Image: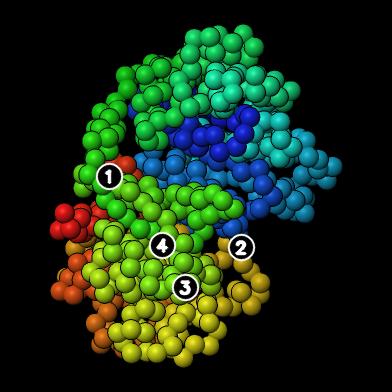
Amino acid sequence: MSRKYLFVVGGVMSSVGKGIASASIGKILQARGYRVTAMKIDPYVNVDAGTMNPTEHGEVFVTDDGDETDQDMGNYERFLGGDLNSPNYMTTGRVYDTVIHRERNLEYGGKCVQVVPHIPLEVIHRIKAAAQKARADITVIEVGGTVGEYENILFLEAARMMKLQTPEDVLVALVSYLPIPSMVGEMKTKPTQYAARSLNTAGLQADFIIARAERPLDKPRRERLAVFCNIPRDAAISAPDAKSVYHVPLMFEEQRFAEKILAGFRLKQRKADLKAWRTFVAQADTATKPLRLAVVGKYFGTGDFTLADSYISVIEATKHGSWANGMKPELTWIDSERYEIDSTSVRELGAYDGIIVPGGFGTRGIEGIITAIQYAREQQIPYLGLCYGMQLATVEFARNIAGLEGAHTTEVKKRPAHPVIHIMPDQEKKLLKFAYGGTMRLGAYTAKLKRGSVAADVYGTTKISERHRHRYEVNNAYRKSLEDAGLVIAGTSPDGQLVEMIELPTSVHPFFVGTQAHPEFKSRPLAPHALFVAFAKAAKQRSQRRG
């Protein structure tokens, strides 16, 4: 059987749900026993997502092999249940970098290297290499942006070339927004018609149109899409707003979307097994008791809007852990700078069942975060610190318990009285050379946990592997002082040199855990991460005590 490729492209506007659509398509095909992998193509010139501001681009999702990728890679991993790596991610910058490198090495045999065909050919090479490495029957490729933009035209050209070479192996799905203007009161298909025509000008015909809208697609609109976008009526797939993104595979399944895709690929129809997924969705739907959780940090807003995309994996992992405890998470985003303006306002955190401080960088809002951590510790509120959240919990403990006045991280203050958090020596050398992109301690690293610790009990083992993204670490010169004051170093690197986890014993706090890693990247709907399950359990117990 030849490998199959399904391109998912966007129309009308960005952020319409191409990533969830791609992940959901992969899920319903995987449920039929086909080996499925997914790819994300980002049309920007950046080599990866690592140097971009999260409020502009969204979360940087780190893979096991240390690639800094788009947040949609997290959607693919969560829905497909497996790990993706660097070959599954592509940017314009990455493609051009490879082509230029090959030209410098005379790998084109002295030819004139041109934008077309050499850039699209490199794109095709990468797509097929990723499919081959994954041994995939079907590869779902999401092309970032929208049709008609300059940025993604070369990727659409690659799709056109693949379709021309083996038309039976390539399908195209257009995810397009159908607005319902309040002054009109009906769903409008015209923008999608123009999107389909823009796709035609790139030499591609949509095989399916996934109609994103607030409401389900009705018969008149379905017929208009069929007539004006040149598709069969049943190739218009309704994708209305759902209770959660995890409903989307079931929504597609009800419309027999996978069967239509397999028919288009001329592949054998197989019975779907979505039993475990349906059970999970039902569990999420029936979790009605609220679990009030505060997420304290930054990267939450742009202008007048709050952008949860900056921490989408934290959100999803928190949902997984809460639902596993039969609770419905209610997350409140708290800008830590508020507590720097008025430290007494931190008392509002007493109304919450748990507090999370996610990862971050830089100086803004740091004292506010430390104030929030102190409140969580003193008021016995379950606390989970991720990456920077662990480092700042260490700073707070050093200042207020270990008696290290002026303790700080050198990321914020270059020469503090007590640099309990400092830059890793190899990272300092890299920054002196202005090597910023892709140079952090990235990807999966193993850690050993202290026997009898909360962390070891939560994980059920003393050897773990988690993904990382950081330059700073706990300063080993202060480890003894911190431990003597009661901080538990619950996890370290295998050689014992790098602090991976800290905690407070349960005799002094119900749940206070910090990790240098980003466990949120490994939480799955059908396999919630143990740390988030344990945190939600502790928060649930606080909720029950408070009535």
Ranked by sequence position, the earlier of labels 2 and 4 is: 4
The reply to whether callout 2 and callout 3 are in contact (CB within 8 Å) is no
Q: Residue at x 78, y 35 (%)?
A: 116
- Observer-side mark, 3 or 1, equals 3
Task: Where is residue 236? Give x, y as percent.
Answer: 52, 16
Q: The residue under label 1 is which amino acid type?
A: Lys
Residue 123 or residue 332, whichever sits in front: 332
Which residue is drawn at the image coordinates 40% and 35% (left, top)? 245
Residue picked out by circle 2: 437
Q: Residues within 10 Å of mark 4 (few under 14, many from 20)?
A: many
The reply to whether callout 4 and callout 1 are in contact (CB within 8 Å) is: no
Mark earlier in primary sequence (2, 1): 1
Residue 390 position within the rendered picture, expressed as x and y whole percent measured from the top left: 37, 70
Q: Earlier in the sequence, mark 2 or mark 3?
A: 3
Dot 1 surroundings within 10 Å: few (below 14), some, or many (20 or more)? Answer: many
Q: Position of residue 516 (x, y in %)?
A: 39, 67
Mark 4 or mark 3: name the one nearer the start of the chain: 4
Residue 499 visible (yes or no): no
The nearer-to-camera label among 2 and 3 is 3
Residue visible at 74% across and 37% down?
150
Snapshot quadrant of residue 272: top left
Q: According to the image, label 4 marks what residue?
A: 296
Q: Which residue is mark 1?
A: 328
Q: Which residue is mark 3?
A: 340
Q: CA distance from mark 2 to mark 1?
A: 38 Å
